[in-house]
Amino acid sequence: MINVAHPVIGKRERQLINEVLDSRMIASGKYVTAFEQNFAEYSGAKFGIANANGTTALHTALLMCGIKPGDKVVTTPFSFIATANSILFCGAKPVFADIDPLTYNINPAELEKILKKEKNVKAVMLVHLYGLACDMAEILKLKKKYKFKLIEDACQAHGAEFQGKKAGSFGDAAAFSFYATKNMMTGEGGITLTNDAKMDKYGRQVINHGREGHSTHTVLGYNYRLTNLAAAIGIAQLEQLEGWIKKRNENAAALSKAFENLDFIKTPAVPKNCRHVFHQYTVRVKASEREKFMKYLADNGIGSGIYYPAVMYKQPYYKKLGYKSGLCPEAEKAAKEVISLPVHPMLSKEDIEKIINVIKEYGRE
């Protein structure tokens, strides 16, 4: 089976893990500090706060931006549930804006409709979905006009760029995930970025029990720390990330070129001003065709996935909160049609050829 994801663990990861084990400093320490600095520098931010996972990184980012109970935070409904859940963790209310059907990212025009309509919008949490940066030029215009805090959920967008600037460097804060299937990983892990020194200081307290010094606790904090073991993997993975991005783009380009004349499948859009990093290579087929197509792929040894089969507000818990269907028609339509195909850097030339030939054969049926 050609799997959708293939985490890479090589000699460099093993070398640094063994260094940590030999040091006996398993918990947070110098490897975490080095990883924070390296990833922040890579992403174009001044400060990085390593976290236990991407969800804690999102929660920390919201708290750093001052989100409190009763605040409204506008976000996309078409993402992993952690995006909206982290807003609920703060006692705030997620307000959902529809997506651009070409990019799957939040649609700036739909965002502005909500900003005009809703009162008490404190922040916008956008998502750079599948490895493609949002339209940051338009969103930054809205930020200037409506004066909201901007939080980037960049959990799928390590190294993605808009007009040459990396995802995670545009907002007041940003969050990345290093879950095992991301473009780079630490097994579990995350990081919160910011360019604001005061927010950085507060965020470091948030993730470490509210500490100021060793035994003084001045704010409500959590245990969201990353370990040296996880950070060691992250250091090694970051060193290789650019090469992996290059391979993902080569694989995506080969697939898109091969499928450009297939009527039943719609390939991913790549805006000219963006560097897509293809965390997922996501195509669209008719909703009535999707289950049959995925079974055909599986029967022919090709893995696939649906990210995401339901918009957030149609999840059972969110229905209990009073959210209704029909809020974001484009997102709901996409949820019925998207399929992600293998694009990871460990695919061989033969794997790519097999994926292409199998899908072309389906088109001839």
Image (cartoon, grey):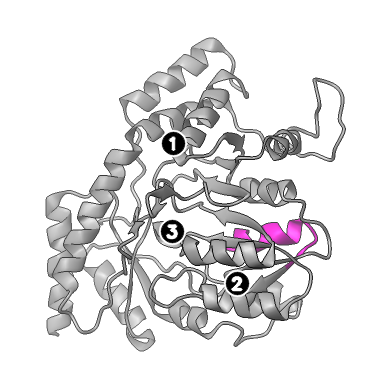
Residue that mark 2 sits on: 312
Q: Position of residue 183 (x, y in %)?
A: 39, 46
Q: Secondary structure at mark 2?
A: helix
Which residue occupies 75% across, 77% down?
Answer: 320
Of the numbered discs in the image, which one, if any, rests on residue 42?
A: 1
Q: Amino acid at mark 2?
A: Met
Q: Amino acid at mark 3?
A: Ala
Q: Secondary structure at mark 1?
A: helix
Place residue 261 in its image quadrant: bottom left
Which portion, as a residue range, is magenta? Answer: 81-93
Q: Nearer the viewer, mark 3 or mark 2?
A: 3
Question: Mark 1: few, some, or many residues within 10 Å (few <14, many ≥20)?
Answer: some
Q: Position of residue 33 (x, y in %)?
A: 57, 24
Which residue occupies 68% across, 35% down?
Answer: 197
Kindly report the distance in space between the C-alpha atoms of the residues bearing marks 1 and 3.
16 Å
Residue 240 against residue 171 in the figure, above or below:
above
Instruction: Find out whether residue 212 is within the magenta segment.
Output: no
Which one is in front, 337 or 174? 174
